[in-house]
Amino acid sequence: MTYRILPLLLVFFMSFAPKATTNTDPILIASATANNLAARIEIVYNSLDANHFAMPQITCFKKAMAGFYALKEKGLIHKDILTVIDFSMSSTKKRLWVIDLSTNTILYNSLVSHGMNSGGEYAKNFSNAPSSNKSSLGFYTTGETYMGKHGLSLKLDGQERGINSNARSRAVVMHGASYANPSILRSQGYLGRSQGCPAIPEALKKEIIKTIKGKSCIFIYHPSRSYEIASRLVS
């Protein structure tokens, strides 16, 4: 009879075992998802091949990656290329990074200009308004190239309503400019400024524009509390 009793005892004791449950609390689920994303971004940052360049600040990089993943999930990004511009830094510093996320490699680290009404050496004021001559913060996707007054240029589409959504109508584009060349630092002590465009050195414009054109992601960062409150991609 023993062989009949053992299965019954097993069923009896299993009835008292704690049962696995599925957590359906949306707050806890969101928290777990955020923790997983933060850990994923930390791994990406720590595994970056700097390629002899300086590394971007991790605070800036984390926000850039969070927005990158969100835009990619929406199908707005087609290339695993992330351009990070850190406007918390002096314009005398190389504060633009182009990162290939498929290989975790920094491809370029360059000077970049901000808008003439955003500040002098440092960018401090930002706007989405036409004719403001200020830079706009936030996330952009890259569009098509064209030949303009600065030669090869790249159109940008702002992805944050009220923050940078007027980029197209304002003609905020990426282009090369003589005032963004390193030589200007020796003559005036800080980089020349644009009408709101992220202008880069002439020597790098063809390489960078070719690399990032066609639906890659650009993030222009500044530790602005008003931006973080308004943004749905970093808040």
Image: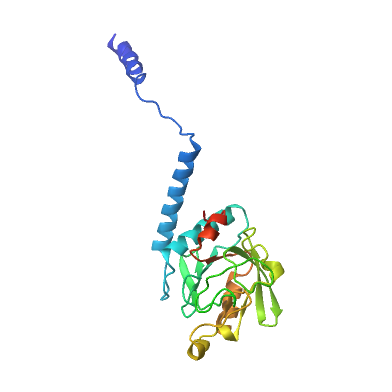
- Image quadrant assignment for residue 113: bottom right
Please give the name of the residue rendered at 35% of the width and 20% of the height, measured from the top-left corner: 14
When the figure is inspected, residue 219 is found, relative to residue 180, above or below; the finding is: above
| Quadrant (top left, top right, bottom left, bottom right) of the N terminus | top left
Callout count: 0
Residue 195 or residue 35, whichever sits in front: 195
- Can I make out residue 231 in this image? no
When the figure is inspected, residue 71 is found, relative to residue 22, above or below; the finding is: below
- Image quadrant assignment for residue 177: bottom right
Residue 6 or residue 77, whichever sits in front: 77
- Give x and y (percent) for residue 20: 41, 29
Q: Is residue 162 left or right of residue 187?
A: right
Residue most toward the left? 2
Residue 12 or residue 169, whichever sits in front: 169
When the figure is inspected, residue 75 is found, relative to residue 5, above or below; the finding is: below
- Give x and y (percent) for residue 227: 55, 60
Query: What coloring was used for the rendering?
Result: rainbow
- Give x and y (percent) for residue 92: 47, 80
Residue 54 or residue 168, whichever sits in front: 168
Residue most toward the bottom? 187
- Give x and y (percent) for residue 97: 50, 71
Please give the name of the residue rendered at 42% of the width and 67% of the height, measured from the top-left corner: 57
- Can I make out residue 165 in this image? yes
Please give the name of the residue rendered at 57% of the width and 56% of the height, measured from the top-left corner: 230
Q: Is residue 147 left or right of residue 134?
A: right
